[in-house]
Amino acid sequence: MKFLASQVAAAVNGEMFGDDVLLEGATQDSRLVTPGCLFVPLPAERDGHEFIGAALDAGAAAYLTSSGLEVGAGSGIIVPDTAVALLALGASLRRSVDIPVVGITGSVGKTSAKDMAKAVLARSGPVHSSPQSFNNEIGVPLTLLNTPDDVAALVLELGARREGDIASLCGIARPDIGVITTVAAVHTGVMGSVDVVARTKGELLDGLPAGGCAVLNADVPEVMTQAVRTRARQITFGAAGEVRASARSVDDHLQVSFLLESPWGRTDVHLGVPGVHMVDNALAAAAVGLVLDVPLEEVAVGLSEARLSPGRMQMETAPSGMLVVNDAYNASPTSVEAALRTVSSLPDTGRKVAVLGLMAELGEESNDAHQHVVAIARELGVEVFAVGTDLYGIESLEGIDEAFEAVVGLGLGDGDSVLVKGSLVAGLQELAERLSAL
């Protein structure tokens, strides 16, 4: 989206110095600067203000600052707090666009549902969405600011680590359609209980306009109890929902085909992503498309063409013939169990191995949750290696190098498969990439 530096200053109550340049897009990362963008330095391990010069050298046309101007370069906008200013700027941009905005939240599946919804809506026109998991107080306003001028719809992922987070993001994004994928034991170490998680996800429904729509998982009671919070129309998905899947079948690549049934009619669907657990995400995406008048047959095409963000059920055959399932972007008890069941259902007759890292922020439930996952794996015939944590109740490998050597030592090849999964803090993406090159 294009905007003037003076418009930025007005939106954030800042003071502008330098030329009133035309800006296009924004970033907080000096390594991702594009010509003519706005650079937003944020406090982190290193203060982003240290990189203003580098951002300008890379082509940024203006920058926000709360610690003084960069002498002799670019246009600066002084604000008390750059993080607060970023939120205000995102909210201002949202007020200036008149396109449908879809907000997607949930304990698991929100990134995959977002990717699928984008693919479905793209059948009717250009769509902009949150890259990867840009779902917090930084990612949501940046996604808004980087919206192209010609898009017909916007799909935003909304995440939370505490009560009030979704409400805050909705105050910026103002979604017309709100999707809750599911509610499960995620971030309970911070939020305290599944009930609190449900209330937090339900904040999405509070701000939906009366003419909007809530898309809800009918199979999850914790989701449906939140339905009373909205005046908007409601569409449900899942086995008990209005948008549902019947006559399911799974091919050798674990891609699911099913009959999509809905108030708009029926059509056959073949998902372009692996995993039976992706069906509910596909149904949520289908409901979004149907509500926004995407023809039923085009919904099916979109679902067949959908591709997931990196680190989510990526399947790659290594030179050795071993299949590596990279699902290492995040992990919760629900998503790990789903991934284990997916790997166990592979038609290959070889060994099935899971290399698991920490499932973070589970609080008092952490020990039981980790050990339950191991019990599920054993029941499914999947061998488990733990990396960097003893919570699984089995001997733990110290790090990526040791885990890599352990898998190499198994001598896996054709017909064997390895699942790599853990919370982002476990850092197992690198392991998945190294294994894929074996």
Image (tube, rainbow, N blue to C red):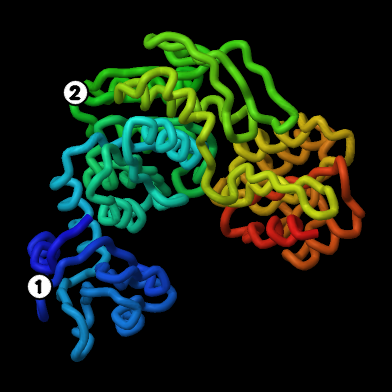
Tell me, yes or no, if residue 296 can be seen here.
yes
Query: Residue 398 versus residue 11: which sits nearer the camera?
Result: 11
Please provide percent x and percent y for residue 293: 30, 22
Disc 1 versus disc 2: distance between alpha carbons?
Answer: 38 Å
Taking depth in this image into account, of 103 and 5 the one nearest to the observer is: 5
Q: Residue at x 61, y 38 (%)?
A: 335
| Residue at image point 78% right, 52% down | 318
- The reply to whether residue 163 is visible in this rendering is no
What residue would you read off at disc 1?
20
Secondary element type, mark 1: loop
| Residue 211: mark in rendering | 2
- Check disc 2: other Cα within 10 Å, few if <14, some if 14-19, many if 20+: few
Residue 236 locus on image (x, y percent): 40, 18
Relative side of 200 to 390, left or right? left
- SS state under label 2: loop
> Label 1 crowding class (10 Å Cα cut-off): few <14, some 14-19, many 20+?
some
Residue shown at the point (37%, 32%) measured from the top left: 121
Q: Tag 1: residue type?
A: Asp
Q: Nearer the viewer, mark 1 or mark 2?
A: 1
- Residue 287 lies, in percent from the top left, at 39, 22
Location of the N terminus (image quadrant): bottom left
* Horizontal side of residue 200 vs 38, given as left or right: right
For the residue pair 254 and 431, the one nearer the viewer reads as 254
Q: Relative to 93, is 140 on the left or the right?
A: right
Name the residue type under label 2.
Gly
